[in-house]
Image: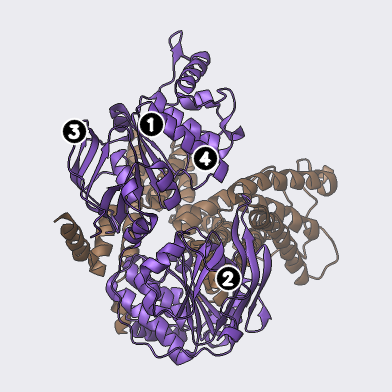
Chain colours: A brown, B purple
């Protein structure tokens, strides 16, 4: 037990401090904005702070909102932990949904098997799109940021082409695919609520990713490659394998996320463009510091904020954009690596007992 | 020290004087220690010294790129403060760097006027004026260039000429050249020297940084020798021989005593046959190296940096493919194998660049200690890392190698340089290898850590019968740790000393600088010879 009480490291302390300051400043900013715009500031502030937990329907909508975001969040975490800034989760999410739809509209597959096949299809399509970026980076030295952004367009337009050519239900009255077979759809966990069994899948996925990244030997290799690939290579780690592997896995998770979202919440494929879940995944990964363990908390924060915004939208004249500003501010502050860096540096030195040494060394050199 | 090196008395025709210059880098490295340096008007002055002797730092201080921590600079008899390159240029001091500062996609004329572009009609760039200025200066100094060509179309020698013209255009009277011949072919070097002589005739003063003695001899009027950040002496070139200069450069280091048993070489562990490497510029970095290494011996590789040592090490570790020849380790062909396969064959590898290849600075000490073996059975259970085993190993190694850190969870970046190197060495020396490649094991670290690491190398030879190949730029280390030494020059083995009794730094220095060469035939250090 003694170990547990051991003081946390300087880096952790400052990481927590930065997050707290970011949240504090964002909250303050939100309150200032609300007071400035609103005609009924007091009520609006209450709704902003407690909206999502005031009614069960709001709470439910917040929880279902969390599911796909958790998937894209851990997807980006894994890809970034492997040292690649892969922004392809957006495209993988969309393409995965198309892949899932292709299987979900097929009739005559037994109930339990059907959703599994759908998720597998969605995941594999997603893995394909993110995996390509890993291959391009390792074999042809293409920057992953660039290739993944481009792949998003490929995923979107190829997906729309497949939808319009093969999956479009012209009798629907709007642009949508054929209806999913009933055998494919998730069951609701409670009658009358929108909480579906995808919830269990996402919890399992987060746990598995946590174990993979933080406990397994493969996760160790991923971290070493992500931190310093030249060191990893010189130590004998198969860098190419790890980079491609993490991108495949990330893409799979993004595609799996959209499949779970579709099977749990929709009865047809109705997306007309990119959905933004992949971008949110990047935001979440930044907040979670690329650690799957932190993803649920980051997603909770984001979903809470957005549900607040929705409720505010209903009850007052505060536009949704206010919340977008608040979101952006939080992300910027959490991402601000060098906020308090001088202070952190000095604390680190003090902690390591280096400070006196360097002062002495400089003093000696001066004389 | 040497009679020939007389401290120069101040004279009237002195153009530049740097007094008592001291420069300490933020990591505590003392690059210049109380340097006094003076240059006469109209001379070509050679600034000579080994890599890391402080030549470039001194010139950066003069050119305003690094602030000195102490000391003063007098130019034409007046004390001047140089805080930026712009100020240096205003004073008439210009520098040509080792790596060119040109924009490849722009034309010669555009590069020439970069930073003070001629204008017409108020605010438009006057290209024709730039061309005219380029032609004018090029004719004045008789250094022909085509103003309209793009920099990317020029040869290396011509790029250098543009750099020189560029600072001449800014009225530089004192020109600093940082190892200008390092990147030139012999033909281009000849041309450069002709240009420099012309510049001298026109009344310019030149400081020529180099460690190539024949060049210094050919072009310089006077030289100043630096060693370990200090001035060893200055002399007229006519008063000293190349051997004198070489001795001054490498110095006479005192031996550090390391207890060693007699060497008893065993079976052949590593053998190289005609290993060569041609880099992407077509330069032959290694030429037909044939070499044997036996268990229980330490073979030192001496050489001035850039003579093939780095390439040899990278080829042996499997991160660079050899262009030709074969390498066998414990009877298995190494060519084409991955780093892990080579390590599995019994190699442990210490790279010269510890911060990039040796450790991951953001990872913890224990994570850094297992990077070469984390996948093995004893660390793995059902795909998961065995935390307890890792911790146990880390604690043992921290104790054995006296690594100073909070505990095994401390990030490596919080450690001092010497302790970081101890982490690398602890990992590599504990991997039960039969062959160790050790590059610059103690470069830039404190004396205590250096001594511990040297003792461990010898201990590996004695206790575990390991075959050690060690490159180093430190003579003390080479002579006290090695059993045998080879010298690399221009990618070739130019000397082999199977017995170090009569070998000292100045003997090595003569071979390292290419003044002498042994007749090397067949396989160096082969079993028959033992």
* Labels 4, 1: one chain: yes
Q: Which numbered disc, 2 or 3, marks the residue that appears first in the sequence?
A: 3
Residue B529 placement (x, y as % from top left):
57, 84
Q: Which numbered disc, 1 or 3, marks the residue that appears first in the sequence?
A: 3
Q: Mark 2 and mark 3: span between their CA atoms?
A: 51 Å
Q: Quadrant of residue B68?
A: top left
Q: Which numbered disc, 2 or 4, marks the residue that appears first in the sequence?
A: 4
Q: Residue at x 48, y 65 (%)?
A: B357
Q: Taking B477 as reference, is A242 left or right?
A: right
Asked if residue B441 can be seen in this view, the reply is: yes
Q: Mark 2 and mark 1: span between their CA atoms?
A: 42 Å
Q: Where B218 sits versus B174, above or below? A: below
Q: Which residue, given by chain and number where applicable, does mark 2 sit on?
A: B520
Q: Mark 4 and mark 1: span between their CA atoms?
A: 15 Å
Identify which residue, B208 or A261, lies in the foreground.
B208
Q: Which residue, given by chain and number where applicable, does mark 1 sit on?
A: B200
Q: Which residue, given by chain and number where applicable, does mark 3 sit on?
A: B12
Q: Which numbered disc, 4 or 1, marks the residue that appears first in the sequence?
A: 4
Q: Residue at x 75, y 48 (%)?
A: A159
Q: Where B294 sits versus B177, above or below? A: below
Residue B245 placement (x, y as % from top left):
35, 56
Q: Mark 1 and mark 3: span between their CA atoms?
A: 19 Å
Mark 3 falls within which chain? B
Q: Which numbered disc, 4 or 3, marks the residue that appears first in the sequence?
A: 3
Q: Which residue, given by chain and number where applicable, does mark 4 sit on?
A: B190
Q: CB atoms at circles 4 and 1 under 8 Å apart?
A: no
């Amino acid at each position: 037990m003694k170990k547990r009480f051991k003081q946390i490291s300087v880096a952790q302390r400052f990481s927590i401090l930065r997050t707290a300051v970011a949240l504090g400043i964002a909250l303050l900013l939100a309150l200032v904005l609300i007071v400035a715009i609103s005609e009924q500031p007091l009520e609006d502030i209450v709704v902003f702070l407690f909206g999502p937990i005031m009614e069960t329907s709001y709470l439910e909508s917040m929880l279902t909102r969390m599911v796909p975001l958790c998937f894209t969040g851990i997807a980006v975490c894994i890809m970034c932990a492997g040292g690649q800034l892969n922004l392809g989760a957006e495209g993988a999410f969309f393409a995965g949904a198309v892949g899932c739809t292709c299987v979900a509209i097929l009739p005559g597959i037994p109930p339990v098997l059907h959703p599994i096949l759908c998720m597998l299809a969605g995941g594999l399509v997603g893995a394909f799109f993110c995996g390509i970026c890993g291959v391009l980076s390792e074999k042809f030295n293409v920057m992953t940021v660039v290739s993944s952004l481009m792949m998003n367009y490929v995923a979107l337009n190829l997906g729309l082409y497949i939808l319009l050519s093969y999956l479009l239900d012209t009798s629907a009255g709007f642009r949508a695919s054929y209806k999913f077979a009933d055998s494919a759809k998730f069951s609701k966990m409670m009658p009358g609520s929108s909480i579906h069994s995808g919830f269990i899948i996402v919890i399992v996925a987060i746990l598995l990713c946590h174990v993979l990244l933080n406990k397994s030997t493969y996760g160790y290799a991923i971290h070493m490659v992500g931190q310093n690939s030249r060191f990893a290579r010189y130590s004998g780690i198969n860098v190419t394998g790890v980079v491609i592997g993490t991108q495949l896995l990330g893409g799979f998770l993004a595609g799996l996320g959209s499949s779970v979202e579709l099977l749990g919440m929709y009865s047809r494929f109705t997306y007309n463009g990119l959905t933004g879940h992949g971008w949110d995944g990047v935001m979440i990964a930044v907040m979670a510091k690329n650690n799957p363990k932190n993803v649920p908390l980051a997603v909770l924060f984001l979903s809470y904020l957005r549900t607040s915004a929705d409720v505010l939208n209903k009850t007052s004249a505060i536009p949704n954009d206010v919340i977008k500003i608040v979101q952006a501010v939080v992300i910027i502050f959490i991402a601000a690596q060098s906020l308090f860096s001088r202070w952190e540096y000095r604390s680190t030195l003090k902690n390591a007992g280096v400070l006196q040494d360097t002062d002495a060394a400089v003093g000696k050199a001066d004389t | 020290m040497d009679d020939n090196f007389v401290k120069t008395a101040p004279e009237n025709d002195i153009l530049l004087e740097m007094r008592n210059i001291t420069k300490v880098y933020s990591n505590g490295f003392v690059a210049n220690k109380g340097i006094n340096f003076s240059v006469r008007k109209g001379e070509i002055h050679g600034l000579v010294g080994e890599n890391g002797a402080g030549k470039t730092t001194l010139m950066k201080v003069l050119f305003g790129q690094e602030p000195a921590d102490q000391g003063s600079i007098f130019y034409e008899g007046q004390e001047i403060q140089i805080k930026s390159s712009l100020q240096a240029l205003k004073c008439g001091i210009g520098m040509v760097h080792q790596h060119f500062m040109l924009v490849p996609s722009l034309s010669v004329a555009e590069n020439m006027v970069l930073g003070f572009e001629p204008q017409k009609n108020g605010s438009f760039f006057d290209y024709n004026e730039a061309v005219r200025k380029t032609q004018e200066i090029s004719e004045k100094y008789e250094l022909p260039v085509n103003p309209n060509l793009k920099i990317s179309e020029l040869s290396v020698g011509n790029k250098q000429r543009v750099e020189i013209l560029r600072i001449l255009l800014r009225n530089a009277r004192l020109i600093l050249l940082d190892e200008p011949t390092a990147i030139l072919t012999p033909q281009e070097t000849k041309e450069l020297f002709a240009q420099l002589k012309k510049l001298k005739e026109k009344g310019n003063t030149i400081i020529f940084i180099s460690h190539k003695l024949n060049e210094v001899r050919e072009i310089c009027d006077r030289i100043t020798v630096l060693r370990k950040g200090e001035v060893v002496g200055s002399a007229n070139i006519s008063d000293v021989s190349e051997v004198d200069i070489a001795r001054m450069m490498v110095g006479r280091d005192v031996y550090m005593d390391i207890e060693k048993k007699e060497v008893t070489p065993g079976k052949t562990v590593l053998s190289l046959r005609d290993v060569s490497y041609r880099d992407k510029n077509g330069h032959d970095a290694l030429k037909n190296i044939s070499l044997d290494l036996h268990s229980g011996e330490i073979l030192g590789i001496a050489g001035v940096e850039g003579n093939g040592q780095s390439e040899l090490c990278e080829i042996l570790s499997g991160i660079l493919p050899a262009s030709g020849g074969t390498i066998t380790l414990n009877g298995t062909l190494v060519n084409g194998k991955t780093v892990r396969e080579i390590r599995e064959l019994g190699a442990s590898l210490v790279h010269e660049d510890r911060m990039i290849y040796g450790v991951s600075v953001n990872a913890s000490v224990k994570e850094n200690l297992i990077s070469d073996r984390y996948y093995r059975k004893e660390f793995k259970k059902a795909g998961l890392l065995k935390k307890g085993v890792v911790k146990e190993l880390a604690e043992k190694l921290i104790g054995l190698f006296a690594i100073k850190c909070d505990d095994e969870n401390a990030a490596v970046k919080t450690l001092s340089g010497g302790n970081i190197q101890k982490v690398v060495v602890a990992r590599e020396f504990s991997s039960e290898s039969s062959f160790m490649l050790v590059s610059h094991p103690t470069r830039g670290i404190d004396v205590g850590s250096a001594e511990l690491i040297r003792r461990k190398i010898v201990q590996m030879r004695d206790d575990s019968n390991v075959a050690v190949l060690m490159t180093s730029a430190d003579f003390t280390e080479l002579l006290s740790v090695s059993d045998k030494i080879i010298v690399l020059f221009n990618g070739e083995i130019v000397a082999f000393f199977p017995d170090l009794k009569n070998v000292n730094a100045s003997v090595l220095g003569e071979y390292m600088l290419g003044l002498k060469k042994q007749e090397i035939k067949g396989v160096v250090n082969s079993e028959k010879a033992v």
